[in-house]
Image (spheres, rainbow, N blue to C red):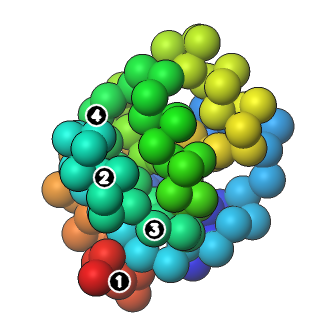
Amino acid sequence: MKVSELRELIQAENMTPALSEDREITCGYVCDLLSWVMAHGDEGMAWVTVQTHMNVVAVAVLSEMACIVLPENIRMEAESLQKANDEGMAVLTSPLTAYEICGRMMASGVPAHN
């Protein structure tokens, strides 16, 4: 699944529209503890989190994730969005809950992180 397909699946808005949505999603993950995500993050991951600060972008870039997904229409701060754009990290925001987002990803064949 590509980021563009995930965006449609979860009725999300792309908060970084200047970036390509062609990255392939290899797995999904939901967690808000950054140190835990740093230890378990993986290339191509779609990471669902409620956190929106600059360190979220840094962790996603470090792990070469496909995108950051914010549930419940959470908005990322302008400074963090600028960093995401600069680093090429797509950020989506969805009206769905984290639970619903992950359920839809699983039902569509996106595997959980091993």
Count neighbours of disc 3 (C-alpha within 10 A) and say few if under 14, some if 14 to 19, many if 20 or more: many
Q: Label 2 is placed on what type of residue?
A: Val
Find disc 3 in the rendering and name its residue: 42
Find disc 4 in the rendering and name its residue: 50
Q: Position of residue 96 (x, y in %)?
A: 29, 46
Q: State which mark lies toward you, 2 or 1.
A: 2
Work out how far the residue at label 1 is from the one at label 4, CA to CA, in angstroms: 21 Å
Q: Label 3 is placed on what type of residue?
A: Asp
Does dot 4 land on a helix, a strand or a loop?
Answer: loop
- Say left or right for 10 vs 37: right
Vertical arrangement, residue 25 with respect to residue 98, above or below: below
Does dot 1 land on a helix, a strand or a loop?
Answer: loop
Vertical arrangement, residue 66 with respect to residue 110, above or below: above
Count neighbours of disc 2 (C-alpha within 10 A) and say few if under 14, some if 14 to 19, many if 20 or more: some
- Say left or right for 30 vs 47: left
Residue drawn where x is 31% and y is 58% of the image:
39
Residue drawn where x is 55% and y is 50% of the image:
62
Q: Label 1 is placed on what type of residue?
A: Pro
Using the image, tell me which numbered label, if any, was put on residue 37. 2
Q: Position of residue 70 (x, y in %)?
A: 38, 39
Using the image, tell me which numbered label, if any, was put on residue 111. 1
Kindly give the residue lying farthest to the bottom in the view shown: 109
N-terminal label among 4 and 2: 2
Q: State which mark lies toward you, 3 or 4.
A: 3
Q: Position of residue 87 (x, y in %)?
A: 72, 38
Work out how far the residue at label 2 is from the one at label 3, CA to CA, in angstroms: 9 Å
Vertical arrangement, residue 65 with respect to residue 80, above or below: below
